[in-house]
Image (cartoon, helix red, strand yellow):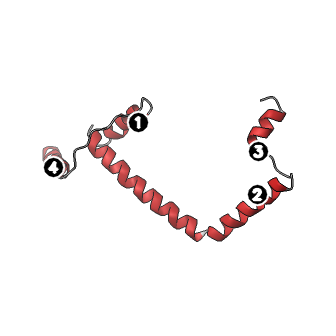
Amino acid sequence: MRRASQLRESLVVGLYTQAMAIRQFQLTPEAEPILDSVAASFGGDASLALSELLIAHESIESFLDEMEGSYAAELIRQRERSARQFRDGLAVSWEQVKLDNGL
């Protein structure tokens, strides 16, 4: 049973990877271990892992766009309130707080 499951997974991954575009890229030292970690979830296939990460990124971006649209009025209200507080001297930047306190 396990052998059939492995064969089926191998066939699906094989079909999937044959249709993939080939690109060359460089990773930063910070990104490389992250990709290796994610690739472990895809049988060590970094190409498949990267493809899935990009698809997930697109889904997240779409979700955030939808949320921003849904809450646009509230976000604008908060931005205007913050700008008014800075203008009136009721709020200061984090940089100013650090300067004022020797941090």
Mark 2 element type: helix
Residue on which disc 4 sits = 18
Along the viewing direction, whichever of 70 and 92 lies nearer the viewer:
92
CA separation, marks 1 and 4? 24 Å
Quarter of the figure with residue 83: bottom right
Mark 3 element type: loop
Going from N to C along the chain, the mark reached first, 1 or 4, is 4
CA separation, marks 1 and 2? 36 Å
Residue on which disc 2 sits = 82
Residue on which disc 3 sits = 93
Residue at 27% of width from left, 37% of height from top?
44
Mark 4 element type: helix
- Left or right placement of residue 65 versus residue 44 in this view: right
Residue at 37% of width from left, 36% of height from top?
37
Residue on which disc 1 sits = 34
What is the crowding at mark 2: few (fewer than 14 residues within 10 Å), some, or many (at least 20)? some
Q: Are marks 1 and 3 in contact (CB under 8 Å)?
A: no
Query: x, y percentage for residue 103?
Result: 77, 29
